[in-house]
Image: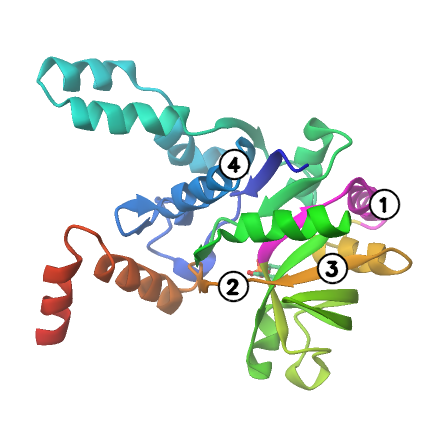
Amino acid sequence: MIRKAVIPVAGLGTRLLPLTKALPKEMLPIGDKPVIEHTIRELVDSGIDEITIVTSARKDLVQRHFAPDGDLERELRATGKDGLADAVAELSSLAHITYLYQNGPYGNGTPVLNAARVIGDEPFMVLWADDVFVAEVPRAQQLKSAYEATRAPVLALMPMEVEDAARYGVPIVEEDLGGGRLRISGLVEKPRPEEAPSRYAAIGGYVVTPGVVTELEAATRRWHDDPAGEIYLTDALHRHATGNPVYGQVIDGTWYDTGSPLNYLKAQFAAVLAHPAYGPELRKLALEG
Ligand code: G1P
């Protein structure tokens, strides 16, 4: 059973600068909620509500968004704005969130290892906050079901155009098991298109098992001997896949990589047009424009 998840947010958000100089990319709105809130609601909707956010000092707005604010709530209630007070209160009771400061070598394996030391010896989910999905069954639930069926590490996949290979981890597919489930024997991080081992991209969702954490620990020990390297989750999964089962799950849904400017705007545009209250009016505006 997966009960816990990790969301790394310590990245600098360089692709969206200067917008993200002061405002963390995880706090950019999609519709009327920041990116990270979509990710947390996705986890909660999938039955995972113990969440470790691995952060940095410059991302304090993320913590403030989910922190209780009794003064604000009291003020809203005193002025009859109970609906808003309830919405503010709901944010701080959405999930059990703990925060850790990222500490260690450069690379996305480090926040996962930081969190694993707190979580201990059980499988957990890792979601990059900037890969946002609109899906009937949440991506996290699809990943969780794949783990429950396989009891092995699972990564979320989407079909990609081969020319985009250099932006993603690309799996080596061993066997197509049907229903979007693939057995994979390794991963290549950001290959050149002509070297891409498949037409799938790893898209920011992983079920990590203690065996994968052991590989991250080994990578960190190697880094201490030779600090020129970086620690990547993809490499740890690749090493684990040599001799152990690892699976990919092609996610049913629409994917927005909100860490890139155009895709962030696409996600925002789609969410705005789908807004339950304001969508119809905004669609009219978009057509006139
Ligand atoms: C990271 C991973 C990569 C994955 C991608 C998905 O890369 O290293 O394997 O495909 O996220 O968004 P980044 O986008 O941080 O460079």
Which residue does the numbered mark 2 point to in the structure image?
Answer: 252
Q: Position of residue 158 (x, y in %)?
A: 57, 68
Mark 2 → mark 1, Cα distance in angstroms: 34 Å
Tell me, yes or no, whether the two marked residues, 1 and 4, touch with CB atoms within 8 Å.
no
User: Looking at the figure, which quarter contains the N terminus?
Assistant: top right
Inspect the image, locate mark 1, and give the three-letter code of the amino acid beneath it.
Answer: Ala
4 or 2: tag closer to the N-terminus: 4
Highlighted magenta segment, given as a residue range? 204-226
Mark 2 → mark 3, Cα distance in angstroms: 16 Å
Tell me, yes or no, whether the two marked residues, 2 and 3, touch with CB atoms within 8 Å.
no
Q: Position of residue 198 (x, y in %)?
A: 69, 78
Which residue does the numbered mark 3 point to in the structure image?
Answer: 247
Mark 3 → mark 4, Cα distance in angstroms: 31 Å
Inspect the image, locate mark 4, and give the three-letter code of the amino acid beneath it.
Answer: Ser
2 or 3: tag closer to the N-terminus: 3
Which residue does the numbered mark 1 point to in the structure image?
Answer: 218
